[in-house]
Every structure is written in C-alpha cells, then in structure tokens.
Image (tube, helix red, strand yellow):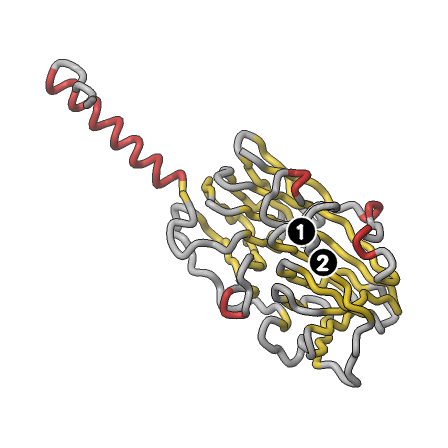
C-alpha cells in the first residue's frame, strides 16, 4: 500500500515555475503530490512577503486555503476576503482569484489542490488573466464568515466512533459539500492526552499535518512519530492507527480526497477481526462435530 511521511522544510521554499512572471514575493513548498504516490491532490505550504501579490488566475481544480500566520487578501471572483490566522477560504473550480499581502509580516498558509494539477507540458490547467481589479474594501472573513470562507472554530464535531474503536479523538470538518467543495474535505483534529484510534483504512486518500503536540502513527507495518511540522499521507486502502503521546493534546490539519463517501468510508479492523475469529471458531466446531473438515463448494 502507498504512504509517505515527511517533515516540512522551510529551506525548500521556492517560487513555483508556473507562477514565474505572475507573482511577486510568492514561494511554495510541495508536501505531497504524484511524486510520492498521490493521484488525487497536491498539498503545499505557501508564503507571501509583505507587499507581495499573485496575479489573477483560473485553475481547472479546486483550491482550499488555511492561514497559519500573517494576513492575506483573496479576490475570489468579485468578492474580496481578508484572512488572518486560522482563517480559511475555498476557491471553487474555474473561479478567478488573486492574492495579495498588504501587511507588514510574511503570510504563510496551507494549500490543497484537487484534482491534482497536471505535470508541466501536459494539459494546461492554470491560466493567468492579468491584473486583478481590487475593490476599495475587503470583507474580514475571519470576523464575518461568508459561504466557503471564515474562521476555524472547534464546533460541529463529526460523530464519534464507538469507544472500542477510538477514545478522546474529535474531528471538526470546516470545508465540505455544504460550503461548495466538491473534490475534497478539509478538517482539524484533536486527540486529548491518552487518546487513540484503532487500525482502519479508507477508499480515499488522507493527509495529516501536525500543528501541536505529539502522536504515534502506525501505517501498515511501520510506526512514525508526528509533531508540529510533520506530515503523513495515506493512499487508498492503506491501514493506519494513532495514539497520542506526551503531556499535551495532539492537534492536526487533515484533508480527504476525493470527498468521503456517504457510507462504508471506513473499514475498522477490530470489527472485522471479530468476524474472522467467529468464522474460525465456527470452522473448528464444524470439523469436530463431523469428524472431518467440511467440503468446499465448487
């Protein structure tokens, strides 16, 4: 099964080739993409220097933005949104947008692109449309949320699994279908001290970026320590489990691509292990009572 674990490295910041001549003070680090096995998304950390800007552009994919520090203004179609720390914005498919930093500090944000952008020299999926026509005022989306943009708050948690499967884990999804997203989900998660999540897998790809605290993540036959700046990607069908370690909760940013299915999106190994044991026990009883193993049907 496919997976990848790494650590964000600020030394890798560079101006994206695609944006050459269309930006000023913009740099990006790609965390996961097709090079590590992902087929549905690219996850990045971007930064924009004070006074920097990204020209108006249109993509043949969705973009999700989550601000870590500083402040940016996003011109999304004809609405101007101001985003500060923990602010987020969805850029829908084929929607014109531009970004600028009018503050005095470098802005840094997480960016998810899905469907995954095409490699260079392939089908063109990004177009720059010239200078943006910025309005005289912007809406502070972190104070006055609008559809697809706002300030993350730990509210509306996803319903918990049974205590056998997990304890002390809460996930808050803030970018989803009812906000206009069609290709991915974005969420924040938290594991309290002593929390755990048993082994499971999904029919989608997941990406995790550690924000604070620590956890151990088991992926297939390996175990990895995750802390701030560490990230992990699990492909379709890749088994994984978590347990919090240390003296403070583990918090992370998470994405799912494509969007999680309405049903049967998680295979919990504990539940299937029970069925396997019952099936094995039934076979033993059958062989003992008949004096021979039952015949297999053709």
Query: Circle 1 is placed at which residue position?
Result: 117
- Asked which quadrant contains residue 51, the reply is bottom right
Residue 214 in view (yes/no): yes
Classify mark 2: residues with Cα within 10 Å, few (<14), some (14-19) or many (20+).
some
Classify mark 1: residues with Cα within 10 Å, few (<14), some (14-19) or many (20+).
many
Query: Most extreme residue toward the top, as rendered?
Result: 291
**Residue at 65% across / 61% down in the picture?**
63
- Asked which quadrant contains residue 231, the reply is top right
Camera-side mark, 1 or 2: 2
Circle 1 — which element? Answer: loop
Residue 194, compared with residue 65, is above or below; it is above
- Give x and y (percent) for residue 167: 46, 51
- Asked which quadrant contains residue 81, the reply is bottom right
- Give x and y (percent) for residue 175: 56, 64
Badge number at residue 227: none
| 3D distance between C-alphas at marks 1 and 2 | 8 Å
- Give x and y (percent) for residue 44: 71, 52
Circle 2 — which element? Answer: strand
**Disc nearer the start of the sequence (1/2):** 1
Task: Say left or right for 117 vs 70.
Answer: left
Residue 275, compared with residue 162, is above or below; it is above
- Give x and y (percent) for residue 37: 62, 38
Residue 93, compared with residue 229, is above or below; it is below
**Residue at 77% across / 68% down in the picture?**
129
Quadrant in which the C terminus is drawn:
top left
Residue 209 in view (yes/no): no
Query: Circle 2 is placed at which residue position?
Result: 126
Image marks 1 and 2: residues in contact by CB distance under 8 Å: yes
277 or 195, nearer to the observer: 277
Query: Most extreme residue toward the bottom, as rendered?
Result: 136
């Amino acid at each position: 099964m496919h997976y990848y674990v790494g650590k964000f490295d600020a030394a890798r910041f560079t101006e994206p080739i695609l944006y050459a001549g269309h930006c000023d003070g913009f740099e990006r680090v790609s965390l996961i993409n097709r090079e590590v096995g992902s087929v549905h998304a690219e996850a990045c950390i971007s930064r924009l220097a004070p006074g920097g800007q990204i020209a108006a552009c249109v993509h043949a994919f969705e973009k999700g933005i989550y601000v870590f520090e500083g402040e940016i203004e996003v011109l999304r179609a004809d609405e101007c949104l101001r985003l500060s720390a923990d602010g987020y914005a969805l850029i829908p498919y084929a929607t014109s947008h531009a970004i600028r930093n009018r503050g005095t500090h470098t802005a840094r944000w997480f960016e998810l692109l899905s469907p995954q952008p095409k490699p260079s020299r392939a089908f063109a999926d990004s177009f720059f449309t010239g200078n943006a026509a910025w309005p005289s005022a912007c809406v502070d989306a972190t104070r006055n949320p609008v559809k697809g943009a706002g300030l993350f708050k730990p509210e509306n948690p996803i319903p918990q699994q049974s205590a056998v499967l997990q304890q002390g884990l809460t996930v808050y999804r803030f970018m989803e279908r009812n906000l206009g997203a069609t290709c991915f989900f974005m969420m924040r998660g938290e594991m309290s001290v002593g929390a755990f999540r048993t082994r499971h897998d999904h029919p989608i790809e997941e990406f995790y970026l550690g924000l604070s605290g620590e956890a151990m993540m088991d992926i297939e036959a390996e175990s990895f320590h995750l802390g701030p700046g560490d990230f992990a990607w699990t492909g379709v069908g890749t088994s994984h489990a978590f347990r919090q370690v240390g003296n403070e909760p583990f918090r992370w940013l998470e994405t799912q691509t494509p969007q999680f299915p309405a049903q049967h999106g998680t295979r919990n190994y504990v539940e299937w292990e029970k069925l396997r044991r019952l099936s094995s026990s039934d076979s033993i009883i059958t062989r003992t009572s008949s004096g021979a193993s039952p015949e297999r049907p053709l």
